[in-house]
Amino acid sequence: MSDSEAAAEGDTTLDTADLPFRVMPAVTVDNEHFWTGGEHGELRILRCQACGYWIHPPAPICPQCLGKDVVPEATSGRATVLTWTINRQPWYPDLDPPYVVAIVELPEQSGLRLTTNIVELDPEDIDFGLEVRVTFLEYPDSGGSVWLPMFSPVNHV
Amino acid sequence: MSDRGSGGIRLGEREAVISGVGQSEIGRRIYRDPLGLTIDATLAAVEHAGLKLSDIDGISTYPGNINQPPGFSGVGVVELQDALRLDLNWFCGGMELPGQLGAVANAIAAVSTGLANHVLCFRTVWEASAQGDKGRASVTMGGGGDAFRAHGFLQWTLPFGAPSAAIWIAMMANLHFHKYGTTREQLAWIALNSRRNAEVNPNAIYRQPMTHAEYMDVRMISDPLCLYDCDIPADGSTAILVSRADSSDDLAREPVQVQAVGTALRGRPSWDQFDDLTTMALRDAAAMMWERTDLNPSDVHIAELYDGFSFIALSWLEALGFCGEGEGGAFIEGAERISRESCGVPGSVALNTHGGQLSAGRLHGFGFMHEACTQLWGEAGERQCLQGDGSLPEVAVAAAGGGPLASTFLLTSG
Ligand SMILES: [Zn+2]
């Protein structure tokens, strides 16, 4: 069973009740795969079909071979914490600090990164190089749900 | 005839000079119309240069007239042009520039190509008044209501509770700490050096002395950045007058020469996708500037470097070659190498001599250019830097921007 299937089965799905306010992304045809892949338990990134290069943020051309056949594909959902911060400042009502904001790198390609939250750990336990995997937080939105890809430790910290 | 650098590149910036600078009243919550502040700065700069308002035939500004976030702008080219009934041959206002001082780079390009003779560059902020007594959280991006949706880069950060550059820069600083062993104890010296300089700047906002212990004890914003690593929202307008070097108009003082400009955009222009997250786009802007001059970092007496967050100034110090990559923490420790007294001392550079945005107030980039010129002209009053032999500083760097956008200017006295 792949990690994405495991995520789809719900063993790491977060409780969506009483969600605090979060700014929602403007979902368009260009980024819909990223923000809704979580419905299928998949972290989807555009990939060049000619040379295999992953493209994020989404763009309609491969920067490596200039191929235009770019299609969303599921990643493994695994990642490593490249850098992080414990945010201690309240920015939005009910989104209470402290929480971890991190930039994670996906193993599929050097430099393939996302900014995200690391969840299901005590913020004080966050560290560089932490192995994490995706877990989706579904947010109902007017145009349909958005699935925010967050990450949790692979191993108990 | 313009100078040519190595490889025969045309150094058009040498055909531009800075002929005058001006500032409005600066303060916290002064509740004044931003256009009024801009007019005050404009008239001050024109008078300072010894020019007449009718000599101004160009305007350049950052970020143009936008109304979000509150206090970030509020004046564009057309409001100033109309209020003063200026006759312009060239103008430019916008946000997609190599940092805030990109507006000055545009003006340099305009006078160097002959599209204008005297370009009034300005940056106006009234963020302190806009935030009132409610603090920064009152203007958090996307915090205004349910209708807002994040587009572009912001979509990758806002949903994760990361609406502020404080968080984005904190992650870069943390990686620098992790990779090079930099510490909060070291980073403190950016803020402490600025405060010490602000003590003797009558226009600075925070002038009371600050101790290292006070820095270490203040509340954290986003690890490893604390409150004193973040600049102070302010109200005020700064004007910089860029003129053609061969203009026949009489100037009130020998103008500041523009030796080299760096405005590069290389790699990935993004807060989280940049190739090396221990540094920023300023690395490449600095590299470009040094490619356009025979001067070296060791020739620089004064460095006015953007410190919207303290770590950005540290990053500029490394990028500009005042110390090695990863050595910024050790370089600033104790502040001996960055104090006003270090002007002209080998291996040192006087940093943010007015107090930077950390203590003098967030005039958003333009304050650094204003101070660099003021120091070169010897008009900085009690905070004036002098070389060991008592002579005025002769070479300065003014640089602004952080994250994906930056520009830097090498300036010399005439
Ligand atoms: Zn390709």
Image (spheres, rainbow, N blue to C red):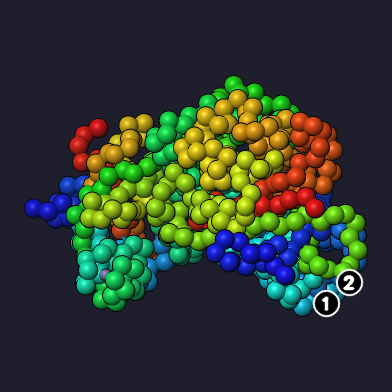
Q: Residue B107 appears in which quarter of the rendering?
A: bottom right
Q: Residue at x 68, y 36 (%)?
A: B350
Badge 1 amino acid: Asp
Q: Position of residue B288 (x, y in %)?
A: 55, 57
Taking the image as shown, residue B375 lies to the left or right of residue B176, namely right
Secondary structure at numbered mark 1: loop
Residue lying at 74% horizontally and 63% vertically, measured from the top left:
B16
Which residue: 46% across, 31% down? Answer: B182
The label on residue B87 is 1
Q: Looking at the image, in which quadrant does ligand 1 appear?
A: bottom left
Helix, strand or loop at disc 2?
Answer: helix
In the picture, the disc for residue B381 is none
Question: Chain for mark 1?
Answer: B
Q: What amino acid is labelled 2 in the image?
A: Ser
**Label number found at residue B54:** 2
- Quarter location, residue B358: top right
**Quadrant of the frame with the N terminus of chain B:** bottom right
B105 lies left or right of A70: right
Chain at numbered mark 2: B
Q: Is residue B237 above or below residue B326?
A: below
Say whether disc 1 or disc 2 marks the residue closer to the N-terminus.
2
Please, is residue B88 above or below residue A1 in the view? below
> Is residue B106 shown to the viewer in this render?
no
